[in-house]
Amino acid sequence: MRIAKRTPFSGRPFITSPSVLGCSPDKPFLYRLSAIGARPITFSVKGLPDGLKLEGQIVSGTPLFGGCYTLTVTAENGEGRAEKEIRLEVFPGNIRRTPLLGFTTWNAFASAVTEEDLNDTALCMEENGLIDYGYHYINLDSSWQGEYGGEFDAIQPCSRFPDLPGTIAKLHGKGYLFGIYSSPFIEPWGCPPDRRSIPGCTLPPADPRFPSNNGGIGTDRREKNNVRQWAAWGVDYLKYDWGPTDPVNADIMRKALDESPRDIAYCITVMAMPDSAEYWRRNAASWRCCPDTDGKWETVKKTADAYLPWQRISGHGHYIDLDMLAIGKMQTFVCDLTENEMVFDYSLRAFLTVPIQISSKLRQADDFELDLYENEEVIALNQDGLLLAPTLAAADGDLRIYEKKLENGDLALGIFNGSDAEKEVVYTLGKKRTVRDLWRKEDLPLSDRIAVRVEPHAALLYRIEK
């Protein structure tokens, strides 16, 4: 299918930052204001709370008092000016509001990832404009782990990361946020081939209450040690990975994160079961319950199915995670998806309001891949300030239609044809309305209905004016 071409560095400013941000009082805050448009762009902000300041386009500092603050953000370039109000909610534990946008290393580099890969990926995301669309996180998956030691008797980086704290500081200086991987397993997944094992957040002997896979979960608990170390390094996000997941081990880590002097968003993976849904919703920024992505259409379909039990739970700063994207050039797999299937896969994450984590070798990304990632109108659905997940409006086998209310009163419509046959869809609007095709960035002819033929393995996204 045809999708619009990206335009990160041309035209008037368009502010891509979401309309709502969150953080805790008395803990460090960092956020890079984002906008596309012709360079240079100059930013200004009115309404920052005490303790925060703007330098260039990065807001940083430590908010001194809790509360809800209305920020007026202005972006100007030689082509024009844009203004946007952003609500900054400063309350304890209020770390993320909209779903995470960023990059994660596993599919791209697997256990061969290096510190240079992190630095080059960050540079590439600046050069191709991804950071300007709001992809702010760079998350380091498993295989970074060396041995226990250091000031906090915590896991230290292996030799492929000779100066991880320095790299994190450099990323922060550019406005990126940094994520890290760990596990309550004694021996986490992701061990590189030259190692027998890598350490997790618990040490032997194994606790008999929990399954014995991966050496089990140890009785020597080191969660607090590792959280202190991550906070000292400046970590902003934790992917905590084990299976079967359980609230007991999750809660030990959650309490350690709550005591941290730094906000660290918390992602539970790999299979957060529905019988603990209320715990995940209250305590995790995101949780995962779907197969590992692998660039295969059948896995994309399973990922789409995995969302259904969670649609009434996900939202308001706590989101189901459909795992990282498996699109583009990767270390782990060859992507066998067609262009339609890639649009379907990305649209799942964008429309269903879940984290979007690119995980490919961005130096080798082609134009279609970057056009897919850099559509500000599609991203706006994912980052909408109402913080609502969509609801299933209609289904016919593998054809599903989702509706999503938006902050400005508009309605978003997502049509996902997972079947092997073309489908005809008619959606009645009640009266003539302006309808925007978001992937093409084109308005449809004024009508009281949307009537469309949807190709197999394809997704269409629309924004319907209120």
Image (spheres, grey):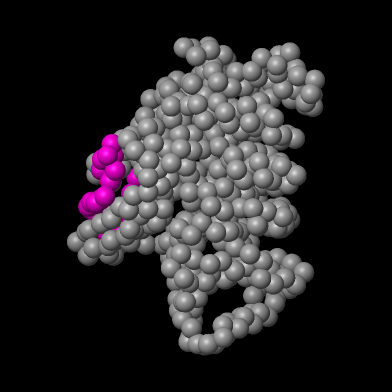
Outermost left residue: 78
Residue at 61%, 33% in the rendered image: 240
Q: Nearer the viewer, residue 319 or 37?
A: 319
In the picture shown, does residue 465 fall above or below 86?
Answer: below
Q: Nearer the viewer, residue 221 or 56?
A: 221
Q: Position of residue 151 (x, y in %)?
A: 46, 12
* Quarter holding residue 458: bottom right
Q: How many marks?
A: 0
In the picture shown, does residue 160 fall above or below 132?
Answer: above
In the picture shown, does residue 299 fall above or below 461?
Answer: above
Q: Position of residue 443 (x, y in %)?
A: 45, 79
* Quarter holding residue 454: bottom right
Residue 306 visible from this viewpoint: yes
Residue at 76%, 19% in the rendered image: 207
Residue 122 visible from this viewpoint: no
Examine the structure image and report whether residue 184 is included in the region drawn in magenta: no
Examine the structure image and report whether residue 48 is included in the region drawn in magenta: yes
Residue at 48%, 21% in the rendered image: 229
Q: Position of residue 102 (x, y in %)?
A: 48, 45
User: In the visual, does 445 lie left or right of 322?
Assistant: left
User: In the visual, does 86 lie left or right of 267?
Assistant: left
Q: Which residues are magenta?
A: 32-54
Q: Position of residue 8 (x, y in %)?
A: 36, 58
Residue at 46%, 81% in the rendered image: 434
**In the rendered view of the protein, which quadrant contains the N terminus?**
bottom right
* Quarter holding residue 122: top left
Q: Nearer the viewer, residue 299 or 303?
A: 303
User: In the visual, does 349 lie left or right of 64?
Assistant: right
